[in-house]
Amino acid sequence: MENKNIETLKKLGLTTYESIVYLTLNYLVSGKAIEISEHSKVPRSKVYDVLKSLHEKNFIEIERSRPIKYSVIPPKEVFKREKKDLIYKLNQLELELNEIYEDQISQVQAPMWLIHGEEKIINKELEIISRSKKSINLRIGFLFKGEIERLNEIFNKKSKISINVLASPKCYVGNKKVEISNYFNQNNVFIKTDDIPQVKMIIRDENELLHIYSKFSKNKKDIIPNTSIGVWNQYEDIAKNYNERFMMQMKKLNSISNKNKNN
């Protein structure tokens, strides 16, 4: 009987003896307590309590005969139920811990952190966007590989908030030219293009800010690996200041666009 199977069952809340007996019953399908004790090597003095507990946890069934027989519930049924229950519990725990995290994060004494590496930076972007309640403002001067798809995925989930994007007309992802404005088509995304530096910025609800920088190759096309850094800032005054400047630039571009249409 493999230890890894016992350890996996223990993660579902079974004890070591319960795991051994349950695995044994899968081989026997059905049996009397004495038989189960002999095959599993679980002492007879323990096996009755173990079988009773497995029945209470809905892993086995008891046939009220003489002598009493114990039958295993088909693993497909057991694991379908247990996986559903585990996923539900994990989702509930995630919601509870996220509420605690989001409530406490603004109270941290030094609300500035450096984040290194593309994957960690993208994950932080998505985390910040997921916490948004009113608005997300983004200035996009470059993109990481695979980032645009993940941004679109979370934007689709945030259909009730205002999303403003100020983007460079084009950038290069993996040496491939990308026109950023063509990739955002959600109804709640308002996008303008302008000649902006190769940096990125995200502002959440006017009170949280992430700046992202990277070094580029000599032709300014490719990101040099392992040079990307994010500056995560939760000083509300700084975030509001950047947000005001961002919105002023968006209004200016919108005004120019309207004039050009009228002309």
Image (cartoon, grey):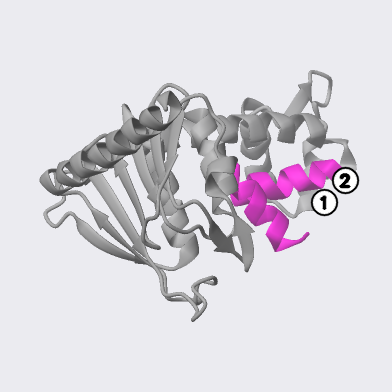
- The residue positioned 71% from the left and 32% from the top of the image is 59
Q: CB under 8 Å between callouts 2 and 1?
A: yes
In the picture of the structure, the residue carrying the numbered disc 2 is: 27
Magenta extent = 1-26
Q: Residues within 10 Å of mark 2 (few under 14, many from 20)?
A: few
* Residue 88 belongs to the span the image colors magenta: no
Q: Position of residue 90 (x, y in %)?
A: 51, 37
Q: Of the residues shown, which amino acid type is indicated by label 2?
A: Tyr
When asked about the image quadrant of residue 7, the answer is: bottom right
In the picture of the structure, the residue carrying the numbered disc 1 is: 39
Left or right: 79, with 67 as reference point:
left
Q: Position of residue 118 (x, y in %)?
A: 47, 64
Q: Of the residues shown, which amino acid type is indicated by label 1?
A: His
- The residue positioned 28% from the left and 37% from the top of the image is 252
The answer to whether one can see residue 95 in this image is yes
**Circle 2 SS class:** helix
Q: Is residue 88 above or below residue 113?
A: above
- The residue positioned 50% from the left and 57% from the top of the image is 143
Q: Position of residue 166 (x, y in %)?
A: 39, 44
